[in-house]
Image (cartoon, rainbow, N blue to C red):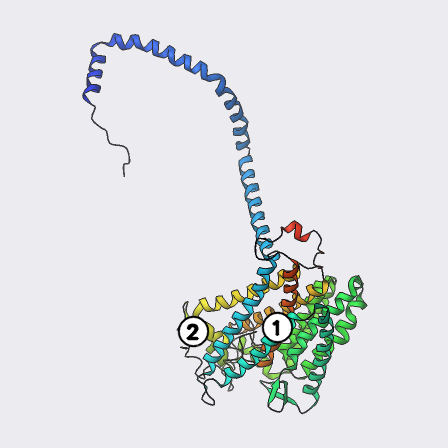
Amino acid sequence: MDKRRPRVPASPEQRRSQLRAVEDPTDSAQERPAQRRASQDRASQDRPAREPEAREAQPREAEDSDGAAGRRWKAERTSSRQNRVQRFWSFLEIGNPYTTFWLVLGSTLALSVIGLTFVLSSTSVDPTGGAFTTVSRQATWAAIGLAGMFVMMILPTRWLRAVGWFLMLLSAVLLALVAFTPLGYTGGGSTNWLRIGPVQGQPSEVAKLGLVMWGAAVLAKKGRLLSQFVHWVTPFVAPGALSVLVLVLAGGDLGTSLIIILIVGTLLFAAGVAMRYFVIAASLAAVMVALLMLVTPYRMMRVWAWLGVNCDHPTDPCHQMQQGYYALASGGFWGVGLGQSRQKWDYIPEVHNDFIFTIIGEELGLLGTFTVLGLFAVLAVGMFRVAYNTEDQFTRLVCLGVIAWINGQAFINIGMVTGLLPVVGVPLPFISYGGSALTVTLIAVGVVLNFARRQRQQGPSRRGRTAPSKAAATAHRKPISV
């Protein structure tokens, strides 16, 4: 398309001037030298001002011809990228202590409410009991957990080390009762439940919290001695963590064993143990897990189902995973609506426990699953801020251990139901049905809130004061040991 301006007809005055120029060419010829001299005078006056600009432009053109402009552009892009990364890490690491406190508490309460909602949705169609029977029990355990969280939040911080020792001894006794007495109850292929009268629970959940708090107290007490092999092994790894791991494996609970290994590795890494030991320990752990799968037929069956092999077995090992995929796929982006799931009608086994994330995906769609993932991310950011902005090694190790526990378990569960990992029977924290797991997890968050509350009291308030700068916040704080 021609975008040139249309030619406008000349006005009468313009036509008369053109005719005069044609009729009397001498006038225009006489005017031309005068106009030429005037333009030359103006050019001579402007030349001194333009010559420096020309001299400055010549080196710039030479630099541009050598690629200096490209290098300058790359340097600017690199600097801008570094600034964005620094701002992002500053957001993760440093913040107003009041905001950090509410990040942890708010995300915990939101996840707990989502869990109660979907326990009700997935069990309301159970024909063996009432619509509110299961969710009533879960709500009772949630109330106990919230009370425990509040107690741990207001408890004097100096008492928490002693609480860690108590929980570690208590969990060892309870795990021994599960493994070696008739009080142990078998469910889901493993003996990890303790039943005393009408009450039953999982002592391994208490062992997770006890291992985090006791291990943090021991490693913080060791200090610089952790550079020596014998000091980080004794007593944290052996006999502490190793005894808990053996008792859990005696009941056949491989999923909880993986979480315990993750907690131990995180605490040792944050305490500053040399990396060469992690390579050796990871190799040994991988070999042990492979052996446990090979010697246990039902675990090997789950691995084959994950690989899509032997799905025609009479036990139909691929049924649970396939129905979970159908639930996630039918949800789409917006979901079919809260309470409108079709796969919960006895199509997915343990739908209210290990596979409850599939019901979230079906009823709330991709948006709902991203919301749950975002809440776990917010919880991790809040806990990491508490760990980063403290000088106390015990506080730092406890926060990082709880992050590894909760978010590591969430990653394994979500990876399991989405097909990234084989089914290992790990519940989704705060959301899956399980009274002891929900209660102990809320108590663990209460420990972190204890540290966050102390930082809020010592730091800036929410009114009229802002968070300190990164330089001010890190000037008198020891870095996290790695």
Q: Evaluate if marks 2 and 1 touch, with contact meaning CB atoms under 8 Å apart.
A: no
Give the camera-side residue of 450 and 211: 450
Q: Secondary structure at mark 1?
A: helix
Disc number for residue 150 = 1
Residue 361: x percent and y percent?
A: 46, 72
Residue 121: x percent and y percent?
A: 45, 79
Q: Residue 67, can we see it?
A: no
Q: Is residue 227 left or right of residue 325?
A: right
Q: Separation of disc 2 and disc 1 at Cα?
A: 32 Å
Circle 2: is it few (<14), some (14-19), or many (20+) Cα within 10 Å?
A: many
Three-letter amino acid code of the residue under disc 2: Glu
Identify the image quadrant of the C terminus. Answer: bottom right
Front disc: 2 or 1 = 1
Q: Is residue 336 left or right of residue 472?
A: left
| Residue shown at the point (51%, 75%) measured from the top left | 115
Q: Secondary structure at mark 2?
A: helix
Identify the image quadrant of the N terminus. Answer: top left
Q: Residue 238, can we see it?
A: yes
Residue topped by disc 2: 363
Give the camera-side residue of 470 and 404: 470
Q: Is residue 35 left or right of residue 466?
A: left
* 422 is higher (above) or lower (below) than 177: above
Mark 2 / mark 1, whichever is N-terminal? 1
Q: How many marks?
A: 2
Circle 1: is it few (<14), some (14-19), or many (20+) Cα within 10 Å?
A: some
